[in-house]
Image: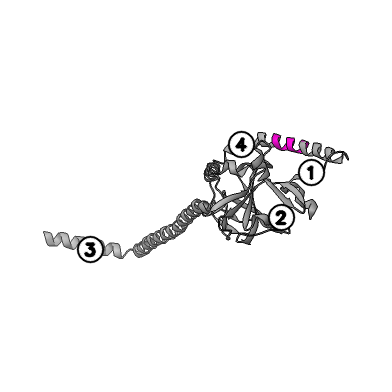
Amino acid sequence: MNEENNGASKNKWSRIFRKKWFFPAVYLTIAALLLSVVVWYQNLDNQIPEVLDREESQEASDEFSPHPADEDAQSVMEQQEVIQMPVLDRDQAEIVTKFYDYNADQEDQENALVLYNNRYYQSTGVDIAAADDEAFEVVAALTGTVTEVKEDPLLGNVVVISHQNEVMTYYASLGEVQVKAGAKVKQGEVLGSAGKNLFGKDSGTHVYFELRKDGNHMNPELYFNQPVSSLDSNAEEAEASENSEVEEDEHSDMLEEDPGEEETPEEDSIGEDEESDE
């Protein structure tokens, strides 16, 4: 019985094999399967580079694109900086010429006058020198951008740095300069070395330092070790003080024109009148 069934099964498959359509159908089925595998593999290859490109693009964007929050954070950090004296070793530095303040006592006002070419000038900054009169490194008082580097015939080498919120710092009487215009500097970064200049020759080897807020001269000595934000509250007061200084200078000039008045040394601002002497 089993032999009969096996014989019938073999005869059935033999009849199928002998059909004309059998082998073409097998070939078409195999070809369709192979084609499907090839198409799937090609699509897989195309998808992988796209995914990789998106990942690389995202990584590059995260790494190099500045984020607005980062810029805001940097601005806030600069506003929280404490204004430091522009020297590395503060213990060895001393202020030898003060900022001229009309509200200061007579001794401080006398220490804020600079005699040049038989004429007195009011100092709009401070001269800082070492106790041994040796050269020393001058550093940035605040983080900022160097906007100007020049050689002045009276003040020597000058570096100007702009900071956040309309704050500017000026460094003059430099011997060597190690920065260029456009450079970004951090607080405490070396700008150059102290030197000598023609205008402040009586101060010896020193750096002349100015601090300005909204274009107004501020007394650096009052703001050393104070946050930058402290300049905001006193900027208007400084502007009013400078306006009163101008009016007082004009009044002094009228008195000097009177032939009956005894001549007295003129007191002028260093930053405003030096160009006329050049």
Q: According to the image, label 4 marks what residue?
A: 232
Q: According to the image, label 3 marks what residue?
A: 11
- Mark 2 surroundings within 10 Å by alpha-carbon count, few (fewer than 14), some (14 through 19), many (20 or more): some
**Residue 247 image offset from top left, x and y in percent:** 78, 36
| Dot placed on the residue nearer the N-terminal end, 2 or 1 | 2
| Dot placed on the residue nearer the N-terminal end, 2 or 4 | 2
**Residue 59 image offset from top left, x and y in percent:** 47, 53
Nearer the camera: disc 4 or disc 1: 1
User: Is 102 drawn above or below residue 24 in the view shown?
Assistant: above
Span shown in magenta:
240-247
Is 245 colored magenta in this rendering? yes
Tell me the distance, in whole angstroms, between the alpha carbons under discs 2 and 4: 31 Å
Picture quarter with the C terminus = bottom right
User: Is 99 drawn above or below residue 54 in the view shown?
Assistant: above
Type of amino acid at the residue the image marks with label 3:
Asn
Type of amino acid at the residue the image marks with label 4:
Asp
Type of amino acid at the residue the image marks with label 2:
Phe
Nearer the camera: disc 2 or disc 3: 2
Nearer the camera: disc 2 or disc 1: 1
Tell me the distance, in whole angstroms, between the alpha carbons under discs 3 and 1: 138 Å
| Dot placed on the residue nearer the N-terminal end, 2 or 3 | 3
Residue 199, disc? 2
| Secondary structure type for disc 4 | helix
Q: According to the image, label 1 marks what residue?
A: 264
Q: Nearer the viewer, residue 215 or 138?
A: 138
